[in-house]
Image (spheres, grey):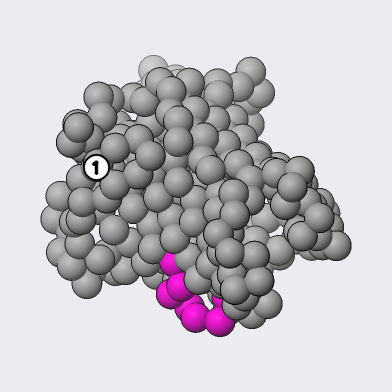
């Protein structure tokens, strides 16, 4: 009888291990009270330089959708970002950009990133698959090792919106890892404090940040950009201003739909 009990115990342990393995890798869980499927954001993009003056250059949209696709058996959000220059601006610099990210609903990390970029004479198409269990990422051209839960450029902003700002003090830094163009980056985001911002939609209480960017053909300063998000649970990005090598760019929220929470940061 003792031997039978031992054999039964061994079989039970083996079966438990098999069941645990079938349930998959124990990914992280992130509490997300900031956004949900159905949220839509529309921005107007302005460009200003000595040559052009201030012009309405185009529009950008961000939309969070539910997806029927599963990645390793896990449900995802499908987040789509589209940028398009106006027809009048196309002669100067034509932009047709589409970015897609399939983001894990529980862990807020990307499984798949799709990029279709048309900016002037520049063309870039990529499909990037993230394997957070085995710490590798595969693009159209390379496979590389990564840190776990590294973001793409779309999912990074949505992940950042889930972070609490309650204890932030002016001068604090937040680090976000992201993968782009077959390279891993660490962006240090400087908190600039709480400010009142007025836009086409009205006045808002905001949190101001300066994200670090890669210098090169577009940016000469590692901190050229200021981003304002609403100082409420939604953390909606409502305004971005950035210096570029030639001129400056402003992106302003002009329409939103289906925020997760009431816009308590709006003052009028």
Sort mark 1 into few (<14), some (14-19) or many (20+) by Cα contacts within 10 Å: many
Q: Nearer the viewer, residue 227 or 71?
A: 227
Residue drawn at (44%, 60%), measured in percent from left and top? Answer: 241
- Secondary structure under tag 1 reads strand
- The residue that label 1 is drawn on is 204
Q: What stretch is highlighted in magenta?
A: 219-225
Q: In which quarter of the image is residue 112?
A: top right
Above or below: residue 57 compared with residue 232: below
Above or below: residue 71 compared with residue 48: above
Residue drawn at (45%, 30%), measured in percent from left and top? Answer: 255
Quarter placement of the N terminus: top left
- Picture coordinates of residue 52, whole percent (x, y): 64, 65
Q: Is 222 inside the magenta-drawn segment?
A: yes
- Picture coordinates of residue 74, whole percent (x, y): 55, 28
Above or below: residue 158 compared with residue 191: above
Q: Which of 97 and 37 is in front in this view?
A: 97
Above or below: residue 254 compared with residue 214: above
**Can the viewer see residue 173 in this picture?**
yes
* In-image side of 54 versus 208 (left or right): right
Q: Is 130 inside the magenta-drawn segment?
A: no
């Amino acid at each position: 009888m003792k031997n039978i009990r031992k054999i039964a115990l061994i079989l039970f342990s083996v079966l438990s291990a098999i069941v645990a393995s079938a349930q998959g890798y124990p990914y992280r869980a992130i509490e997300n009270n900031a956004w949900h499927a159905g949220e839509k954001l529309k921005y107007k993009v302005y460009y200003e330089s000595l040559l052009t003056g201030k012009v309405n250059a185009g529009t950008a949209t961000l939309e969070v959708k539910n997806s029927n696709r599963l990645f390793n058996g896990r449900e995802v959000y499908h987040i789509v970002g589209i940028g398009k220059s106006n027809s009048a601006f196309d002669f100067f610099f034509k932009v047709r950009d589409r970015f897609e990210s399939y983001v894990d609903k529980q862990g807020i990390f990307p499984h798949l990133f799709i990029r279709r970029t048309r900016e002037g004479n520049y063309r870039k198409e990529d499909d990037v698959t993230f394997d957070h269990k085995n710490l590798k990422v595969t693009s159209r051209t390379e496979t590389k090792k990564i840190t776990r839960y590294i973001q793409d450029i779309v999912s990074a902003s949505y992940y950042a919106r889930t972070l609490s700002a309650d204890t932030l003090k002016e001068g604090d830094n937040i680090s976000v890892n992201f993968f782009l163009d077959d390279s891993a980056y660490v962006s240090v985001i400087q908190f600039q404090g709480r400010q009142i911002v007025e836009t086409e939609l009205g006045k808002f209480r905001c949190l101001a940040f300066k994200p670090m960017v890669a210098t090169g053909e577009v940016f000469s300063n590692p901190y050229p950009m200021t981003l304002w998000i609403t100082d409420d649970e939604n953390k909606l990005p409502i305004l971005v201003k950035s210096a570029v090598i030639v001129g400056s760019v402003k992106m302003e929220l002009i329409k939103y739909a289906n925020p997760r929470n009431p816009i308590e940061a709006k003052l009028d």
